[in-house]
Structure formats: C-alpha cells, structure tokens
Amino acid sequence: MNLPPLSLYVHVPWCVQKCPYCDFNSHSQKGTIPEKEYIQHLLDDLKADLHLVQGRKLHSIFVGGGTPSLLSGEAYVHLLQQIEALIGFEDDIEITLEANPGTVESDRFKHYVQAGVNRISIGVQSLQSDKLKALGRIHGEQEAINAASEAHEAGLNSFNMDLMHGLPNQSLEDAMSDLERVIKLAPPHLSWYQLTIEPNTQFASKPPKLPEDETLWAIQEAGQALLQQHGYIQYEISGYAKAGLQCKHNLNYWRFGDYLGIGCGAHGKITLPEQNQILRTVKVKHPRGYMDLTKPYLYDSWYVEPADRPFEFFMNTFRLVEATSKQAFVDYTGLALSEIKNQLQHAFNSGLLEEREDSWFVTNKGHRYLNDLLELFV
Ligand SMILES: C[S@@+](CC[C@H](N)C(=O)[O-])C[C@H]1O[C@@H](n2cnc3c(N)ncnc32)[C@H](O)[C@@H]1O
Ligand code: SF4
C-alpha cells in the first residue's frame, strides 16, 4: 500500500436558519455561537487523531458546514496557526472556507485571507429572488453579487460559487438565465448541482413542485454546453472549473485520497500502510454531545475490509471525468488487479468501461448508468 495525499475536513455545524432542502449536519443558531470554545474542541479533536498521520503534511483543508462564515477572522487565525503547528502544511496547500452571502459583511473575506484561507466557496444557489425565497435562503441576489466582487478583490487564489438547478417551478429559460448571470460574475470554479429531495428535510415532508424530467434533462444539456462555451471544464458530476483551477480538496476525495475529519459529525479516511488497513472515522454529530468534555470526539471507527475496497475506490474515482489510474487502485486499496479481473471484464463487455494502457475510462454509457457500473464491484 502507498500513501495518497492527506487532506483535512473541518465541520462548523451552525447556520442562521435551516434551509428546507438541506440534510447536512447543520443546526440553526440560537444565541451567540461559542466560537472560542468550539475552536478549542476542534484542536483537541485533531490532537486525538494525530497518531494516525505521523510524519505527513496537509495537502488541503476544507472548512465546511453549516455556515463557517459565521465565525470571525480571528477564530480562523488561531485555528489555522495551530493546525499548521500540529501537522504541517505542504507548500502549495489549498485552504477553502464555505461562506454564505448574507453572513459576510464587507472585508470579512480579507480577514479570512489574512488567516491563511486561499479559496472561498460561496453558496449562491440562485440569483432569482423568488427562487431564493422558495429555497428558504437568508440572502437576496444583490448580496450574492456583492460576495462575488468581494471574492475577486480579497486576494484569493480562486473561488467557487454553488448554484442549484431543477428548482421549484423552474423553466429551462429560468435555469439558463441563472447560469448566465453567475457566469458573468466570473467565478474560477462553479459547482452546479441538481436539487435533490433528501429524506428528513422540510421538502421531503412537504414536497415542492419540481420541473418534469424532460425539463430537467434539457437544463442539464443546455447548461453543460453553456459552461463549456465559457471555458468551464467539467471534471466531476457537478464540478466545473477554469483550466488548472479544480478544487484540490474535492479531487483528493474523489481520487480516494486520505482525510482527517474534525468537528461535529465529520468523517475521516486514513490509510495505515504498515497494517495494510484503511480506517474510517466519524465524530459525534450533535454540537452538545461533541462539546461534552466527559465524552470522546470519536463516535465510531472501522476498517474497510479488502472485499469492500474496490467498490469504495470506484465509487469515488468514477465520478471524475479523468481516467482512473490502475496504479492508484493498487497503491490505495492494497489489492492486486487480478482480484477484480472478472468484474472489469463484465464492465468492458457491457460498454460501461474502456481499458487504456495504465488506466480505465468510464464511457458515456457508463456515466449515464453509473449505478449499474458500480454494482459490478459490490
Ligand atoms: C455543505 S452545502 C452548504 C454550504 C453553505 N452552508 C450554503 O448553504 O451555502 C454545499 C452545497 O450543497 C448544495 N446542496 C445542499 N443541499 C442540496 C440538495 N438537497 N440538492 C442539491 N444540492 C444541494 C448547495 O449548493 C450547497 O451550497
Ligand atoms: S445554509 Fe447551507 S448548510 Fe445551512 S441549512 Fe442552508 S444549505 Fe444547509
């Protein structure tokens, strides 16, 4: 087994209010956020994981949520300084922070940059007020536009905008006009997600009227063409970026890289080559339990059995547009190629996968029937 790059995910669990479509681990903020206390918990949580990653440096950090932009610049100065002192950073580390328009007063991004953040991900979702309202967002279109100009001026290496489509009562024209307006704001990276109705959300109990399948398909096709026309290269199901500006952190997940996860409900995946094991970890989910000093941060952990590794590896790498490296499979799963010979043959015969000298390439059919392809490796 060989070690992949190491990332760190940091979860901030609070939001101003819960959006009706969201199933992320986020809680509406009641009163002031215990910022200092939480940062100290994050650092103690990290210290408890350090024995798993001795001698390694961080390739990327992603502070996600929830709404990380509810915490101050000073909080991140302290957090990032301490993380660097504990693990160490690769020279060109990418450090992303998720920010919601409506929570960032002017100059907030500059404070994050001073703390070491070099990439911001802005949750725009839509630029149409009726859609923002239907999505229960706290911001209006002007705040999203302002956030883009602040991001351009803050001295970041890059920034992302999250946009959703397939919204309640959205027509093809609505969706394209949203996308065109976001493209005009010139984010170097765009995540363009189709709205899904997740169990245990407000939308699941009271479903809104979503566009018909034909409209969803038309939006997908037209949107992909528009993005391509403006120089956004698709590299993952929902990920588009200008050349060379893909998100290193997400790429590391999808290439079956390693990551520590700290904060409420955070997941981690760490390769332990000496034991020929892959360890998965999950932290305590609710802020109250997580910050309870009498309890450990770790909620659960388990080893990924060799039999489960091919599926877990391909579930990530086949999301990407790039070919999957055979060497990465051997290095990161610790398995020989001969162990998946039959499944691969099946995938080639069904036209879902093609073989190249050093890699495998998911065909158009394979992307369309990704679940069928993945099922071969279960
Ligand atoms: C971790 S979430 C939230 C980040 C940030 N708090 C925000 O709301 O802007 C990252 C992104 O996932 C997308 N997302 C969340 N729930 C979704 C859903 N049910 N369907 C599709 N996309 C979703 C949104 O675009 C969101 O910005
Ligand atoms: S702001 Fe983001 S994380 Fe918070 S509830 Fe809304 S979508 Fe979820």
Image (cartoon, rainbow, N blue to C red):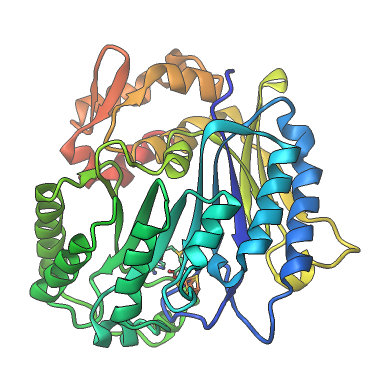
Q: In the rendering, at what x and y percent does residue 100 appear?
A: 45, 71
Q: Can see residue 272?
A: yes
Q: Please provide percent x and percent y for residue 284.
A: 72, 61
In this rendering, would 24 be left or right of 50? left
Write down the quadrant of residue 348 in the picture.
Answer: top left
**Nearer-the-camera pick, 35 or 325:** 35
Quarter occupied by the C terminus: top left
Placement of 5 over or under 133, stated as above or below: above
Q: Nearer the viewer, residue 336 or 156?
A: 156
In which quadrant is the N terminus drawn?
top right
Is 318 left, or right, of 202 in this rendering? left
Q: Residue at coordinates 24% horizontally, 42% vertically from top-left?
A: 367
Which residue reaches farthest right?
A: 294
Name which quarter of the figure residue 111 lies in: bottom right
Q: Position of residue 220 (x, y in %)?
A: 16, 59
Instruction: Inspect this view and state whether residue 238 appears.
Output: no
In the rendered image of this protein, does residue 331 appear above or below residue 94?
A: above
Horizontally, residue 38 falls left or right of residue 25, namely right
Q: Nearer the viewer, residue 231 or 77?
A: 77
Res 47 → quadrant: top right
The residue shown at (29%, 50%) is 188
Where is residue 29 drawn, in percent x and y?
Answer: 62, 81
Question: How many numbered tags mark residues here?
Answer: 0
Q: Residue at x 34, y 41 (%)?
A: 246
Residue at x 49%, y 18% (from the top left corner): 330
Q: In the picture shown, does residue 227 fall above or below 23? A: above
